[in-house]
Amino acid sequence: MINPAADYDSPWKDTLEWYFEPFIALCFAHIHSQINWSRPSEFLDKELQKVVRDAEVGRRWADKLVKVWLNNGQETWILIHVEVQGEKQKEFAKRMYTYHHRISGRYNRPVASLAVLSDTNPQWRPTQYSTEIFGCKIQFNFLMVKLLDYKQQWPELEQSANPFATVIMAHLKAVDTRSDGQQRKIWKMALTRRLYQQGYQRQDILNLYHFIDWVMHLPSALEQTFREELNQYEQEVNMKYVTSIERLGIKQGRQEGRQEEAERLLLRLLHRRFGELSPEIQARVKGLSVEKLEQLMDVAIDVESVEQLVDHLPAPEAAN
């Protein structure tokens, strides 16, 4: 089985912001027709952070809170919750309700809550949260799209000019090829070639490739072969976008971002479990590779004390 990219969170967040309108048009068409797209959408990252800052550590979902204007002039906020764990989550519907309640209560704005499920369980389709006691009842309904359903619409996705179709196609093929590196390389190349064949602008090609490259992670040997094939193809079409120096910069920046995020999550997890950490432990965590940080997150969940975790840390002189 292919080891997946360490974190599906960042590319989803970036892609939702880059292609918010195409996302709504493809996945929630009835909402798209009610929004005045001539007025710019506003991403409310700071407002969202204030209401979810105490969310579960090590979360495997991506959220976006967006201010839009309806055709009737009404201001509306849209919460997009992307479940990227890839498996059924028992508390998912409750979490949707909690976020909706916090946002609408804190900011006194109408909120539409949209869920995007990336798992492979066709029976898991949460759209409601309810609770009742002593005759007092709360029932909350939210909108949901299941990416798995788009497998039945593959021909339509292939023909679609909507850039978010590429995102869904890449996700579906990443899931389908988890145990077959050769097939994943073939599909990664096919989807990348499609970016050029669709006539996308240079920045769109780079943006969409960013997502494809992340979710369709390849072992190093296959990745090297893929790069050689891509370099040859870009020479043939005379559009050296992805294999340019800029691509290397994008990849380096993404890797640095992953390392910083993994480091932040580990320290937060340790603080939540064991309280204030000593400067020595914090220093030994700093600068570790993404792979090592992820291993330590698994260890941190199982150990009973911070002292047990220390046994798994590199020696001080090897921590940087």
Image (spheres, rainbow, N blue to C red):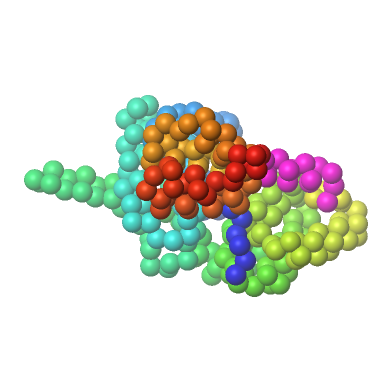
Residue 104 is covered by the magenta coloring: no
Residue nearest the observer in this picture, 296 or 307 = 307
**Residue 146 visible:** no
Residue 255 is covered by the magenta coloring: yes
Decide if residue 65 is on the left or right side of residue 262: left
Residue at 76% across, 65% down: 221
Residue at 37% across, 30% down: 109
Magenta span: predominant SS is helix
Q: Position of residue 93 (x, y in %)?
A: 33, 51
Q: Which quarter shows the C terminus?
A: top right
Q: Position of residue 112 (x, y in %)?
A: 40, 41
Q: What count of labels does the image hold?
A: 0
Residue nearest the observer in this picture, 24 or 5 = 5
Q: Position of residue 269 (x, y in %)?
A: 44, 41
Decide if residue 105 is on the left or right side of residue 315: left
Q: Position of residue 200 (x, y in %)?
A: 75, 50
Residue nearest the observer in this picture, 198 or 206 = 206
Decide if residue 119 is on the left or right side of residue 224: left
Residue at 35% across, 27% down: 106
Residue 176 versus residue 70 in the image, above or below: below
Q: Which quarter shows the N terminus?
A: bottom right
Residues drawn in magenta: 243-258
**Residue 199 visible:** yes
Decide if residue 69 is on the left or right side of residue 159: left
Residue 250 versus residue 47 in the image, above or below: below
Residue at 32% across, 44% down: 97
